[in-house]
Image (cartoon, helix red, strand yellow):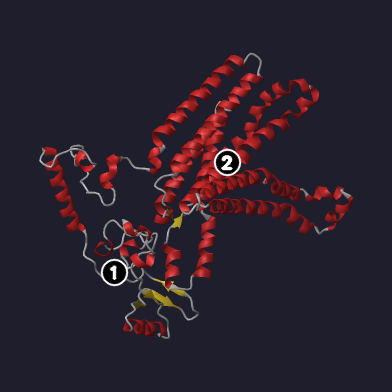
Amino acid sequence: MNPYEARIRQAISYAATAALIIFWAIPVAFVGIVANVSKLCETSWLSWVCKMPAVVLGIVQGILPPVALAILMMLLPIVLRLFGHFEGIPRKTGIELSLMTRFFIFQVVHGFLVTTISGSITSAIEGFSKNPTQIPMVLAQRLPTASTFFLTYAILQALSGTAGGLLQIAPLVIYYVKLFILGSTPRSVYSIRYDLRDVFFGTLFPTITLLVVISFGYSLISPVINGLAWLAFALFYFVWKYLFLWQLDQPASGDTGGLFFPKAIQHMFVGLYIQQICLAALFFLLPGGKAMGGVTVALIIVTAFFHMVLNNSYKPLLYSLPLTLAHKSYGMPQTGEGDDTNEDESADFGGDASPTSPSGVKASKKREESVQEEKILVPSPVPNTSHVQHNQGPGPTRDYGASVPVEGKRNEGPTDFNHPASVEPQRIIWIPEDPLGIGKIEADHLNSQGVEASTENATMSDNGKVDVQSHPPGSDPNTMFG
């Protein structure tokens, strides 16, 4: 893509994101109107609403709004991902990183800023009507009262959020639905039963960092939120540790090399800025608080300076490795973990070390030893017929080698971008064994034609239901459960 076109697409994409954030209140407001549809009877042309049966009116007013709101929130990440595709981001990981930024902005605006401002104004309306000249003073007094909603939110996340994470009712229902609809072949049944679920960090991180922003924003205005946030994060730690150990996995196609974490740190700085700006505004609105307001402004400058230093120090390392790690790159001489590479750095990276100098001789010997080790370690090509599911551990080392852990992880080096069919082993055709013996006959016929097939560990019942008893044929039994 032309770089200028890419920039234009990026600008249009983020403009559409901003418009979506602004106008998202329209469908949400409509859902709120539907939730109070009985009040519309007072309007003459909507009087027919009250003539509906009580059961229908109860469904429309009580069940339809939360369902519609849940659907809207499910559609939001899909739309934001489409914006990332329109921008021209080629990789799935890049789409998730873009989604993380956009979804976080949406969460902060709608889940924090709008709620805080509306809550403060709502509680201050009476003060405005009595004395309009005291609007700044009333806002400064009423702003802390808006923290009640966020205290409730922190408690809700700490209790129901972690309980829902352990219960996993939605994945359980999806599991049985997929098994009923998609479980038609042995491999699909095996994948549904034993593959670990993927995690979508693009939507996971913003929901957690939103709680961080809320905690920072009200940590001084309403200190009780600190204890609730601590409880929430402590429970989150145990829940997500359990999930990542036993239920969740990240395939090689979704690995970013840790790029989600730096973005999460940037989001935490948003919470710091919001906290300090709110404190400065409160100090300046209150009488006699201008001195403390000035100190808070100075604190904002110090925070921004530290933020800039942090970015300048570590941002280059997000996408490029330092030369001190070049010996671990593909195609470079491999050295042991404990080897001292400082002595031959000049020889490795174009220095003036002479081949006859001690360091040059040592470097040459190391390179020769490394080449010999590589020749010994490279396995001879053997026919590869085994198969490992994409979310499982390493396959047999005689077929894959110790450094290729999962299907979807291509061979290291220049073959990373080759078509999977050119670098991955051919799967064994897995046919279920049925009562009539048709599957066995078909497997024998395929084997006679030079196509490997097997009915091992798979059966089909009289009503056509497929079941598996163990791992696919040709794979490592030790990787059955990931």
- Cα gap from disc 1 to disc 2, whole angstroms: 48 Å
Q: Residue flagged by tag 2: what amino acid is it?
A: Ile
Q: For the residue labelled by badge 1, is the local secondary structure a helix, a strand or a loop?
A: loop
User: In this picture, is 105 found above or below 167?
Assistant: above
**Which quadrant holds the C terminus?**
bottom left
The residue lying toward the viewer, choosing from 89 and 219, is 89
Q: Say which residue appears at 32% left-offset and 81% top-offset.
A: 450
For disc 1, the marked residue is 384
Q: Quadrant of residue 420?
A: bottom left
Q: Quadrant of residue 415?
A: bottom left
Q: For the residue labelled by badge 2, is the local secondary structure a helix, a strand or a loop?
A: helix
Q: Earlier in the sequence, mark 1 or mark 2?
A: 2
Residue 158 rendering spot, x and y as whole percentages? 53, 41
For disc 2, the marked residue is 105
User: In this picture, is 130 found above or below 45?
Assistant: above
Image side of residue 234 versus residue 326, left or right:
right
The residue lying toward the viewer, choosing from 30 and 219, is 30
User: In this picture, is 61 found above or below 320?
Assistant: below
Residue 425: which disc? none
Q: Say which residue appears at 39% left-offset and 43% top-offset.
A: 319
Residue found at the very far right of the displayed protein: 44
Q: Is residue 163 visible?
A: no
Image side of residue 352 versus residue 187, left or right:
left
Residue 89 rendering spot, x and y as whole percentages? 50, 52
Residue 421 rendering spot, x and y as whole percentages? 37, 67
Q: Residue flagged by tag 1: what amino acid is it?
A: Asn
Residue 99 rendering spot, x and y as whole percentages? 53, 48
